[in-house]
Image (tube, rainbow, N blue to C red):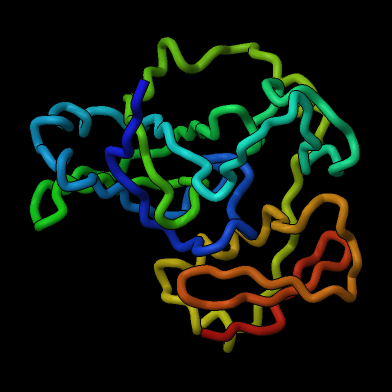
Amino acid sequence: MEMRPIAHIETDFPEKFGIPRQSGLVEALRAAVVFEPAYRSAEAVRGLEEFSHIWLIWEFSRARRENWSPTVRPPRLGGNKRVGVFATRSPFRPNALGLSAVRLEGVETDGPEGPVLRVAGADLLDGTPIYDIKPYLPYADAIPGASGGFTSQVERRQLEVRCPEDLLEQIPPEKREALLGVLAQDPRPSYQSDPERLYGMAFAGLQVRFRVEGERLTVVEMTK
């Protein structure tokens, strides 16, 4: 079967570091799904605006490999325990496909690139190719009492984020909540805990540098 991208997504993440590990963890993140010219049809998205959420099927376009491994090391397990690749959402899989549920905020049909889907909570790199879009169906897609496997054993926590006002002012007001939400998720690999280490992530045209000590993350610098 030949697959070709129908769209790509525009996000504030030009690099992988800092992207939330799952969709929906940072609802304040905004993104745009822009269709490729051959698929820019208002008819193709007719009725989609009635749904609150959609599924994006996309490619880990920077994780392409000729070979694959039956086991991987999930970062949330410290990177030192192997589990089966099909028991994870690792990008390193036989077919590098990702799946994300995002909130649909609007369908813009005007403009040269229309229709454009405005979404929230996406966990994708800027420019990621989208292969399909499907509506999220609450009666079928939400399963009460479902088990989360080994992920249920991993503590979900948020860091206390401290960012001086003069640095925060460098971020556009509409993107500040998103940045603070991303930092609170702790972008570091789970096996790194050096309080003296300076980390850096690219977001919305800025390089954000920070340190983490205990449960507190402190932003120390922002540069364009």
Q: Residue furthest bottom?
A: 166
Q: Where is residue 57 in the image (x, y as percent from the top left)?
A: 42, 32
Residue at horizontal 77%, vertical 37%?
Answer: 74
Q: Where is residue 117 in the image (x, y as percent from the top left)?
A: 26, 45
- Relative side of 28 to 136, left or right: right
Choose top left, top right, bottom left or bottom right for residue 209.
bottom right
Residue at horizontal 11%, vertical 38%?
Answer: 41
Choose top left, top right, bottom left or bottom right for residue 130.
top left
Q: Where is residue 156 in the image (x, y as percent from the top left)?
A: 75, 40
Residue at horizontal 59%, vertical 64%?
Answer: 180
Q: In this rendering, is residue 83 above or below 41?
A: above
Choose top left, top right, bottom left or bottom right for residue 164.
bottom right
- Relative side of 57 to 190, left or right: left
- Front one among 60 and 173: 60
Residue at horizontal 37%, vertical 56%?
Answer: 10
Q: Residue furthest front?
A: 66
Q: Position of residue 8 (x, y in %)?
A: 34, 48
